[in-house]
Amino acid sequence: MSTYQESYCNTTTDLQAVEPNIDGYDSKREVSGWAVTGTADVYVCHDCGHIEKLYRDGADLGDAEKGVADVEAGGDGAWYYDTDDDACYIYSTADPATYHRIEGGRKWSDVKADAVSRASAFVRSYAGKPIIKRTGTGAQSESLRDYDDFVIQATAALACSYLVNPYDVERANVLRREAYSPGNKGSLTYIPGLLDMVQSGQLPLWNESSKITMDGQVTIVSQDTTSTGTLADVEGTPDVHYDRIKVVIEAGGTVTQGEESTVTYSAYVGGSTGLKTVQVVDAETVSGLYQQIGHGMSARFTPGVYVAGDEWQVEVRGDTVEAGPGRRSIRIRRV
């Protein structure tokens, strides 16, 4: 049996959103001190430090050869790093010390991936609560990402701080503080990072209860392009532990102040066989006042045009512990 954990952000686009010049911190270093060998056009650099990838004038020279003999037979650009002697060999038709800039390092995509993996592991530990992947219809955010956007941003900021730190410690610290701040949390001058707000519940994870969901969180499921009216507000105290209420327009039309409405709506709540399966409101006229939608909740429609099939979802949680430090949730592990 094996287990694995996923990274919380992408290795390129999310990092660039935090640090646009992140590709400038690619960890390559100049390899200098090249000397001739006994073979024409083959040069060696001793005491150069470990090299996984070699670059000439910015171009990746590809995979290393298996030995010095392969370099000698490989032609221009062939190279090999001898780990035992800490020496790098290159076949170059022009003296690399004079005509080229030779750099060593790791593959940049691997460097970024490692930074994201390290950052994800830190976020997972620092948050102090399960960070559950958004899966299933209606779970993903507006950006269609698998995790909360603030989790993605915190991970990207922390990964960027790892990449920047060898070159600019001050900038790396700024990026790190965007993710978390280890200062005195009781101080009046303390500014929390994104993960600190996740810990405290100021930024509830998508699966956590919060004041928003306890008051009723409205989401547009589908709406015609000609519709101008909408479900604007919800009030009440949910009399259910958790549910997603479906509110749908049955008969379309226009809701206008001072005129009788011909628009009707229905509402569905969850039952023993699934969510949104039990009808609790049947084709009631939209008045513009607060009207029942189920579970002790009322909703208000705005004046405007409605089309049959326009649908909203109202997510409600009642009598639950709100997001905050130490909140207990189901821990999900992939196997």
Image: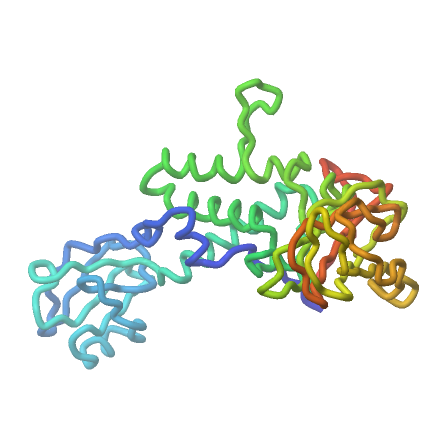
How many numbered discs? 0
Residue 333's spot in the image, x, y percent? 72, 59
- On the rendered image, what quadrant is the C terminus found in? bottom right
| Left or right: 200 as drawn, with respect to 149 | right
- Of the pair 30 and 274, the residue shown nearer to us: 274
Name the outermost residue toward the top.
Answer: 188
Give x and y (percent) for residue 74. Answer: 21, 80
Q: For the view shown, which residue lies furthest in the bottom direction?
A: 73
Q: Quadrant of residue 67?
A: bottom left
Residue shown at 42% from the left, 58% from the top: 12
Q: Is residue 119 visible?
A: yes
Q: Can residue 136 be seen in this view?
A: no
299 vs 105, left or right, is: right
Q: Nearer the viewer, residue 81 or 75?
A: 75
Q: Is residue 48 above or below residue 122?
A: below
| Residue 133 higher or lower than 130, as above or below | below
The residue shown at (18%, 77%) is: 72
The image quarter containing residue 8 is: bottom right
- Residue 193's place in the image compared with 275, above or below, is above
* Rendered image coloring scheme: rainbow
Q: Nearer the viewer, residue 316 or 281?
A: 281
Q: In this view, does 111 lie above or below 251?
A: above
Residue 205: % across, % down: 67, 47
Image quarter of the N terminus: bottom right
Q: Residue at x 17, y 79 (%)?
A: 75
